[in-house]
Amino acid sequence: MTSHDKPHPDPAALPEAEVRLTDMQEAGNLPAPEPQVAEAGVPYVVPAAATEVVPAAVPEAVAAPVASAPASAPAPAVPRRSRTPVRETRVTGQPAFVLHSYPYKETSLIVDLFTRDHGRIAVVAKGAKRPLSKLRGVLQTFQPLSVSWSGKSELRTLIDAEWVGGMLPLERTALLCGFYLNELLVKLLARDDAHRVLFDHYVSTLNELAHDEPAQIVLRKFERALLKETGVAADLARSTTTREPVAADASYVVDPERGAREARVSDVWPVVSGKTLLDMEREDYADPATLAQSKQLMRFLLAHHLGGAPLNTRQILIDLMQL
Protein backbone atom coordinates (compact mmCIF):
# COMPACT_ATOMS: atom_id res chain seq x y z
CA MET A 1 0.00 0.00 0.00
CA THR A 2 1.42 3.36 -0.99
CA SER A 3 1.18 6.58 0.88
CA HIS A 4 -1.62 7.63 -1.49
CA ASP A 5 -3.67 4.50 -0.62
CA LYS A 6 -3.43 4.97 3.12
CA PRO A 7 -7.01 4.97 4.48
CA HIS A 8 -8.32 8.05 6.20
CA PRO A 9 -9.11 7.68 9.87
CA ASP A 10 -12.65 6.71 10.76
CA PRO A 11 -14.60 9.92 11.42
CA ALA A 12 -16.54 8.17 14.10
CA ALA A 13 -13.32 7.64 16.04
CA LEU A 14 -12.43 11.35 16.03
CA PRO A 15 -13.75 14.05 18.35
CA GLU A 16 -16.38 16.32 16.87
CA ALA A 17 -14.02 19.33 16.50
CA GLU A 18 -11.43 17.25 14.69
CA VAL A 19 -14.11 15.82 12.37
CA ARG A 20 -15.12 19.36 11.33
CA LEU A 21 -11.48 20.33 10.81
CA THR A 22 -10.86 17.23 8.71
CA ASP A 23 -13.91 17.95 6.54
CA MET A 24 -12.80 21.54 5.94
CA GLN A 25 -9.27 20.44 4.98
CA GLU A 26 -10.62 17.87 2.51
CA ALA A 27 -12.97 20.40 0.99
CA GLY A 28 -10.15 22.90 0.55
CA ASN A 29 -11.97 25.62 2.56
CA LEU A 30 -9.43 25.96 5.33
CA PRO A 31 -7.33 29.15 4.75
CA ALA A 32 -3.56 28.95 4.91
CA PRO A 33 -2.13 30.01 8.26
CA GLU A 34 -0.82 33.58 8.32
CA PRO A 35 2.92 34.06 8.90
CA GLN A 36 3.89 34.80 12.45
CA VAL A 37 5.50 38.18 13.30
CA ALA A 38 8.30 38.31 15.82
CA GLU A 39 7.44 39.88 19.09
CA ALA A 40 8.57 43.44 19.80
CA GLY A 41 11.88 43.72 21.61
CA VAL A 42 13.56 40.73 19.92
CA PRO A 43 17.02 41.92 18.69
CA TYR A 44 17.67 41.91 14.96
CA VAL A 45 20.28 39.40 13.82
CA VAL A 46 22.34 40.58 10.82
CA PRO A 47 22.47 38.07 7.95
CA ALA A 48 25.74 36.39 7.22
CA ALA A 49 26.51 38.58 4.18
CA ALA A 50 26.16 41.86 6.08
CA THR A 51 29.10 43.70 7.59
CA GLU A 52 27.44 45.52 10.48
CA VAL A 53 28.19 44.64 14.07
CA VAL A 54 25.93 41.81 15.28
CA PRO A 55 23.81 42.39 18.43
CA ALA A 56 24.42 40.26 21.47
CA ALA A 57 23.37 36.61 21.26
CA VAL A 58 19.74 35.93 22.18
CA PRO A 59 18.53 32.72 23.91
CA GLU A 60 16.94 30.17 21.63
CA ALA A 61 13.59 30.44 23.35
CA VAL A 62 13.37 34.12 22.43
CA ALA A 63 14.97 34.09 19.01
CA ALA A 64 13.06 31.10 17.64
CA PRO A 65 9.86 31.70 15.57
CA VAL A 66 6.63 31.74 17.57
CA ALA A 67 5.05 28.96 15.53
CA SER A 68 6.36 26.63 12.84
CA ALA A 69 5.06 26.65 9.29
CA PRO A 70 3.00 23.74 7.90
CA ALA A 71 4.94 20.56 7.27
CA SER A 72 4.36 20.83 3.51
CA ALA A 73 6.30 24.13 3.34
CA PRO A 74 8.93 24.28 6.09
CA ALA A 75 10.23 27.76 6.82
CA PRO A 76 13.93 28.23 6.14
CA ALA A 77 16.11 28.67 9.18
CA VAL A 78 17.00 32.27 9.99
CA PRO A 79 20.73 32.78 9.38
CA ARG A 80 22.58 33.38 12.62
CA ARG A 81 25.93 35.04 12.98
CA SER A 82 28.10 35.04 16.02
CA ARG A 83 29.94 38.17 17.11
CA THR A 84 33.25 38.48 15.29
CA PRO A 85 36.04 39.40 17.69
CA VAL A 86 37.88 42.64 16.83
CA ARG A 87 41.52 41.93 16.18
CA GLU A 88 43.90 43.93 18.29
CA THR A 89 46.36 46.03 16.32
CA ARG A 90 49.95 45.31 17.26
CA VAL A 91 53.03 47.09 15.90
CA THR A 92 56.55 45.97 16.76
CA GLY A 93 60.01 47.40 16.20
CA GLN A 94 58.90 50.80 14.91
CA PRO A 95 61.54 53.58 14.76
CA ALA A 96 60.37 56.48 16.90
CA PHE A 97 61.27 59.55 18.94
CA VAL A 98 59.64 60.91 22.07
CA LEU A 99 58.12 64.33 21.44
CA HIS A 100 56.49 64.92 24.80
CA SER A 101 55.31 63.02 27.87
CA TYR A 102 53.26 63.79 30.95
CA PRO A 103 52.15 61.85 34.06
CA TYR A 104 49.17 59.53 33.92
CA LYS A 105 47.73 58.25 37.19
CA GLU A 106 50.32 57.37 39.82
CA THR A 107 52.93 55.28 38.03
CA SER A 108 52.33 55.70 34.30
CA LEU A 109 53.04 58.17 31.51
CA ILE A 110 51.23 59.27 28.36
CA VAL A 111 53.88 59.64 25.68
CA ASP A 112 53.57 61.49 22.37
CA LEU A 113 55.69 59.61 19.82
CA PHE A 114 56.82 60.56 16.31
CA THR A 115 57.12 57.27 14.40
CA ARG A 116 58.44 56.64 10.93
CA ASP A 117 55.54 54.66 9.47
CA HIS A 118 52.58 55.74 11.63
CA GLY A 119 53.26 59.42 12.22
CA ARG A 120 52.45 60.99 15.56
CA ILE A 121 50.74 58.67 18.03
CA ALA A 122 49.96 58.66 21.75
CA VAL A 123 50.71 55.66 23.95
CA VAL A 124 50.29 54.95 27.64
CA ALA A 125 53.47 53.62 29.23
CA LYS A 126 52.17 51.65 32.19
CA GLY A 127 54.42 51.69 35.23
CA ALA A 128 57.04 53.86 33.51
CA LYS A 129 57.43 56.05 36.62
CA ARG A 130 58.25 53.16 38.91
CA PRO A 131 61.88 53.13 40.10
CA LEU A 132 62.62 49.69 38.66
CA SER A 133 60.80 50.14 35.34
CA LYS A 134 63.05 49.61 32.34
CA LEU A 135 61.07 52.28 30.48
CA ARG A 136 62.04 54.93 33.02
CA GLY A 137 65.44 55.64 31.47
CA VAL A 138 64.50 54.84 27.88
CA LEU A 139 61.65 57.25 27.12
CA GLN A 140 63.86 60.29 26.65
CA THR A 141 63.57 63.00 23.99
CA PHE A 142 65.97 63.22 21.02
CA GLN A 143 67.06 59.59 21.35
CA PRO A 144 66.26 57.07 18.59
CA LEU A 145 64.04 54.28 19.88
CA SER A 146 62.53 51.04 18.65
CA VAL A 147 59.01 50.83 20.08
CA SER A 148 56.17 48.31 20.09
CA TRP A 149 52.55 48.95 20.99
CA SER A 150 49.08 47.45 20.79
CA GLY A 151 45.56 48.78 20.68
CA LYS A 152 42.98 50.07 18.24
CA SER A 153 41.94 53.35 19.88
CA GLU A 154 43.63 56.74 19.70
CA LEU A 155 45.53 55.97 22.90
CA ARG A 156 47.55 52.78 22.47
CA THR A 157 49.38 50.73 25.07
CA LEU A 158 53.16 50.73 24.92
CA ILE A 159 54.50 47.17 25.04
CA ASP A 160 58.23 47.77 24.73
CA ALA A 161 60.77 50.48 23.97
CA GLU A 162 64.48 50.02 23.33
CA TRP A 163 67.20 52.59 22.91
CA VAL A 164 68.83 52.26 19.49
CA GLY A 165 71.69 54.73 19.92
CA GLY A 166 73.93 56.23 17.28
CA MET A 167 73.16 59.93 17.90
CA LEU A 168 74.94 62.56 19.94
CA PRO A 169 72.94 64.19 22.72
CA LEU A 170 71.78 67.78 22.29
CA GLU A 171 73.30 70.36 24.59
CA ARG A 172 72.82 74.03 25.47
CA THR A 173 71.24 76.01 22.59
CA ALA A 174 70.90 72.89 20.44
CA LEU A 175 68.76 71.34 23.18
CA LEU A 176 66.36 74.30 23.14
CA CYS A 177 66.19 74.10 19.35
CA GLY A 178 65.28 70.42 19.66
CA PHE A 179 62.39 71.26 21.98
CA TYR A 180 61.28 73.88 19.45
CA LEU A 181 61.17 71.19 16.73
CA ASN A 182 59.12 68.91 18.98
CA GLU A 183 56.64 71.64 19.80
CA LEU A 184 56.14 72.33 16.09
CA LEU A 185 55.48 68.65 15.41
CA VAL A 186 53.03 68.31 18.29
CA LYS A 187 51.03 71.36 17.22
CA LEU A 188 51.11 70.96 13.43
CA LEU A 189 50.98 67.21 12.80
CA ALA A 190 47.69 65.32 12.91
CA ARG A 191 47.71 61.98 14.69
CA ASP A 192 48.14 58.75 12.71
CA ASP A 193 49.31 60.59 9.60
CA ALA A 194 52.56 59.06 8.36
CA HIS A 195 55.32 61.42 7.19
CA ARG A 196 58.32 59.27 6.36
CA VAL A 197 60.20 62.05 4.53
CA LEU A 198 59.65 64.43 7.44
CA PHE A 199 60.79 61.74 9.88
CA ASP A 200 64.08 61.41 8.00
CA HIS A 201 64.41 65.20 7.90
CA TYR A 202 63.84 65.31 11.67
CA VAL A 203 66.66 62.80 12.22
CA SER A 204 69.07 64.76 10.01
CA THR A 205 68.08 68.01 11.75
CA LEU A 206 68.87 66.56 15.17
CA ASN A 207 72.22 65.36 13.87
CA GLU A 208 73.04 68.80 12.47
CA LEU A 209 72.13 70.49 15.75
CA ALA A 210 74.22 67.97 17.70
CA HIS A 211 77.21 68.76 15.46
CA ASP A 212 76.87 72.51 16.06
CA GLU A 213 75.62 73.46 12.62
CA PRO A 214 74.25 77.06 12.47
CA ALA A 215 70.96 76.79 14.34
CA GLN A 216 69.07 79.46 12.39
CA ILE A 217 69.82 77.80 9.04
CA VAL A 218 68.97 74.33 10.37
CA LEU A 219 65.66 75.54 11.78
CA ARG A 220 64.67 77.43 8.60
CA LYS A 221 65.18 74.29 6.54
CA PHE A 222 63.13 72.18 8.93
CA GLU A 223 60.29 74.70 9.15
CA ARG A 224 60.04 74.79 5.36
CA ALA A 225 60.12 70.96 5.15
CA LEU A 226 57.40 70.72 7.81
CA LEU A 227 55.04 73.01 5.89
CA LYS A 228 55.72 71.10 2.67
CA GLU A 229 55.03 67.72 4.23
CA THR A 230 51.79 68.88 5.84
CA GLY A 231 50.60 70.29 2.51
CA VAL A 232 50.41 73.96 3.49
CA ALA A 233 53.68 75.27 2.05
CA ALA A 234 53.21 78.35 -0.12
CA ASP A 235 54.69 78.49 -3.61
CA LEU A 236 57.72 80.76 -3.38
CA ALA A 237 59.07 80.43 -6.91
CA ARG A 238 56.15 81.85 -8.93
CA SER A 239 53.88 84.85 -8.57
CA THR A 240 50.26 83.90 -7.92
CA THR A 241 48.99 87.04 -9.68
CA THR A 242 51.02 86.97 -12.91
CA ARG A 243 51.98 83.25 -12.92
CA GLU A 244 55.45 84.41 -13.89
CA PRO A 245 58.62 83.23 -12.12
CA VAL A 246 59.66 85.34 -9.17
CA ALA A 247 62.13 88.07 -10.09
CA ALA A 248 65.16 88.30 -7.84
CA ASP A 249 65.16 92.13 -7.84
CA ALA A 250 61.43 92.58 -7.09
CA SER A 251 59.64 92.77 -3.73
CA TYR A 252 57.01 90.25 -2.66
CA VAL A 253 54.69 89.21 0.13
CA VAL A 254 53.60 85.62 0.71
CA ASP A 255 49.93 84.80 1.12
CA PRO A 256 49.87 81.79 3.51
CA GLU A 257 47.04 80.17 1.55
CA ARG A 258 48.09 80.97 -2.01
CA GLY A 259 51.76 81.90 -2.31
CA ALA A 260 53.97 84.78 -3.36
CA ARG A 261 52.67 87.92 -5.04
CA GLU A 262 54.02 91.38 -5.79
CA ALA A 263 54.14 93.64 -2.76
CA ARG A 264 51.83 96.64 -2.46
CA VAL A 265 52.21 99.81 -0.44
CA SER A 266 49.22 98.86 1.71
CA ASP A 267 50.59 95.41 2.64
CA VAL A 268 51.10 94.66 6.33
CA TRP A 269 52.62 91.23 5.73
CA PRO A 270 56.42 90.84 5.75
CA VAL A 271 57.95 92.14 2.53
CA VAL A 272 60.85 90.09 1.17
CA SER A 273 62.95 90.23 -1.94
CA GLY A 274 62.54 87.82 -4.80
CA LYS A 275 66.10 86.66 -4.17
CA THR A 276 65.16 85.60 -0.65
CA LEU A 277 62.27 83.50 -1.97
CA LEU A 278 64.47 81.84 -4.58
CA ASP A 279 67.20 81.19 -2.01
CA MET A 280 64.66 79.56 0.30
CA GLU A 281 63.49 77.27 -2.49
CA ARG A 282 67.13 76.23 -3.02
CA GLU A 283 67.77 76.02 0.75
CA ASP A 284 70.60 78.52 0.33
CA TYR A 285 70.90 80.75 3.39
CA ALA A 286 74.44 82.02 2.89
CA ASP A 287 73.26 85.57 2.22
CA PRO A 288 72.68 87.43 5.54
CA ALA A 289 69.75 89.29 3.96
CA THR A 290 68.14 85.99 3.03
CA LEU A 291 68.65 84.66 6.55
CA ALA A 292 67.12 87.74 8.17
CA GLN A 293 64.11 87.98 5.82
CA SER A 294 63.41 84.25 5.90
CA LYS A 295 63.26 84.38 9.71
CA GLN A 296 60.51 87.01 9.62
CA LEU A 297 58.66 85.25 6.82
CA MET A 298 58.65 81.82 8.47
CA ARG A 299 57.55 83.31 11.78
CA PHE A 300 54.59 84.89 9.97
CA LEU A 301 53.65 81.71 8.07
CA LEU A 302 53.89 79.46 11.12
CA ALA A 303 51.78 81.84 13.21
CA HIS A 304 49.07 81.67 10.55
CA HIS A 305 49.00 77.87 10.38
CA LEU A 306 49.11 77.59 14.17
CA GLY A 307 46.01 79.74 14.39
CA GLY A 308 47.76 82.23 16.63
CA ALA A 309 48.74 79.61 19.22
CA PRO A 310 52.01 80.69 20.87
CA LEU A 311 55.18 78.65 20.70
CA ASN A 312 56.70 78.55 24.16
CA THR A 313 60.12 77.36 23.05
CA ARG A 314 60.33 80.00 20.34
CA GLN A 315 59.93 82.76 22.88
CA ILE A 316 62.77 81.28 24.92
CA LEU A 317 64.92 81.08 21.81
CA ILE A 318 64.06 84.65 20.84
CA ASP A 319 65.26 85.79 24.21
CA LEU A 320 68.48 83.79 23.95
CA MET A 321 69.55 84.12 20.32
CA GLN A 322 67.20 86.60 18.65
CA LEU A 323 65.57 83.83 16.61
Image (cartoon, grey):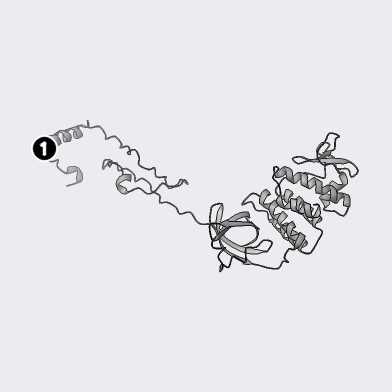
Left or right: 156 in relation to 260: left
Tally the numbered discs: 1
Left or right: 209 in relation to 51: right
Q: Residues within 10 Å of mark 1 (few under 14, many from 20)?
A: few
Q: Position of residue 73 (x, y in %)?
A: 29, 41
**Residue occupying image coordinates x 64% and y 51%:** 193
- Provide the residue designation for mark 1: 15
Can residue 225 be seen here? The reply is no
Q: Looking at this view, is 186 or 137 the one in front?
A: 137
**Residue occupying image coordinates x 84% and y 51%:** 291
Instruction: Name the residue type under label 1.
Output: Pro
Q: Quadrant of residue 244?
A: top right
- In the image, farthest residue toward the top: 29
Can residue 41 be seen here? The reply is yes
- In the image, farthest residue toward the front: 319
Q: Position of residue 108 (x, y in %)?
A: 55, 60
Q: Looking at this view, is 50 or 293 the one in front?
A: 293
Q: Position of residue 301 (x, y in %)?
A: 76, 44
